Image (cartoon, helix red, strand yellow):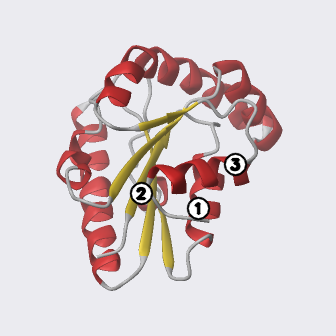
């Protein structure tokens, strides 16, 4: 079975960019952005905000369950899999079993909140920037107190504020014991 990587963090921290580059560093790989699964909902999509209602939790749980099954199927077929998702106030409960699987590596991208806001401003249309900037504030408020616990549980927590994508990929591969 091939490795599975779970890359998480707040909005604007480089999860998708890093995950795509990490996946590209393997000969057979799949990059699976969990937000893409969620955004396949054509009508009735619940978006995260300060309040987490039952429908939002149901949709997140559903997308993550599908992502885990997809990751396991592709890994079983010989593909290295890189999931990317956001850290949530419920602590990523849907991934606990996957993270206990040998060969799964949890990664938290954790640049400063100011750097996340700078990256967001550079990549986001002005009409969406305010929503995402607010989401960055919420994400850091939830994630900051959890970083120590995640590191203690074996997650690779990377301050990527001053790191290029190639260096982040190299650090993740080293953590997984994979040369290159």
Residue sitting at the far right: 122
Residue 165 percent across, percent down from the top left = 71, 50
Q: Nearer the viewer, residue 41 or 115?
A: 115
Q: What distance separates the C-alpha of mark 2 from that of mark 1? A: 9 Å
Q: What distance separates the C-alpha of mark 1 from that of mark 3? A: 10 Å
Task: Indicate the quadrant where residue 74 lies.
Answer: bottom left
Quick one: label 1 or label 3, which is nearer the N terminus?
1
Q: Return the residue at label 2.
A: 5
Viewport quadrant of the N terminus: bottom left
Tell me the residue at 75%/35% (across/down): 119
Label placed on residue 22: 1
Q: Are marks 2 and 1 in contact (CB under 8 Å)?
A: yes
How would you rate the neighbour count of disc 2 (Cα within 10 Å): few for under 14, some for 14-19, many for 20 or more? many
Residue sitting at the far bottom: 77
Quick one: label 2 or label 1, which is nearer the N terminus?
2
Residue 171 percent across, percent down from the top left = 58, 48
Q: Nearer the viewer, mark 2 or mark 3?
A: 3
Q: Are marks 1 and 3 in contact (CB under 8 Å)?
A: no
How would you rate the neighbour count of disc 1 (Cα within 10 Å): few for under 14, some for 14-19, many for 20 or more? many
Dot 2 falls on a residue whose secondary structure is strand
Q: Is residue 178 above or below residue 94?
A: below
Label placed on residue 167: 3
Q: Is residue 111 above or below residue 28?
A: above
Tell me the residue at 52%/53% (across/down): 174
Residue 46 percent across, percent down from the top left = 38, 42
Tell me the residue at 31%/61% (across/down): 103
Q: Nearer the viewer, residue 165 or 87?
A: 165
Dot 3 falls on a residue whose secondary structure is helix
Q: Is residue 49 above or below residue 60?
A: above
Dot 1 falls on a residue whose secondary structure is helix
């Amino acid at each position: 079975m091939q490795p599975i990587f779970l890359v998480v963090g707040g909005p604007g921290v480089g999860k998708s960019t890093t995950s795509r580059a990490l996946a590209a560093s393997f000969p057979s790989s799949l990059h699976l952005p969990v937000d893409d699964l969620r955004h396949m909902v054509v009508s009735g999509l619940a978006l995260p905000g300060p309040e987490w209602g039952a429908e939002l939790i149901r949709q997140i749980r559903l997308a993550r369950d599908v992502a885990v099954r997809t990751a396991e199927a592709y890994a079983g077929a010989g593909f290295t899999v890189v999931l990317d998702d956001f850290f949530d106030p419920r602590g990523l409960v849907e991934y606990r079993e996957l993270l206990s699987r040998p060969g799964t590596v949890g990664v938290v991208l954790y640049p400063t909140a100011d750097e996340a806001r700078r990256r967001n401003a550079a990549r986001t249309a002005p009409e969406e920037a305010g929503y995402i900037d607010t989401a960055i504030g919420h994400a850091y408020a939830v994630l900051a107190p959890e970083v120590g616990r995640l590191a203690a549980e074996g997650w690779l927590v990377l301050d990527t504020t001053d790191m290029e994508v190639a260096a982040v990929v190299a650090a993740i591969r080293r953590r997984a014991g994979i040369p290159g």
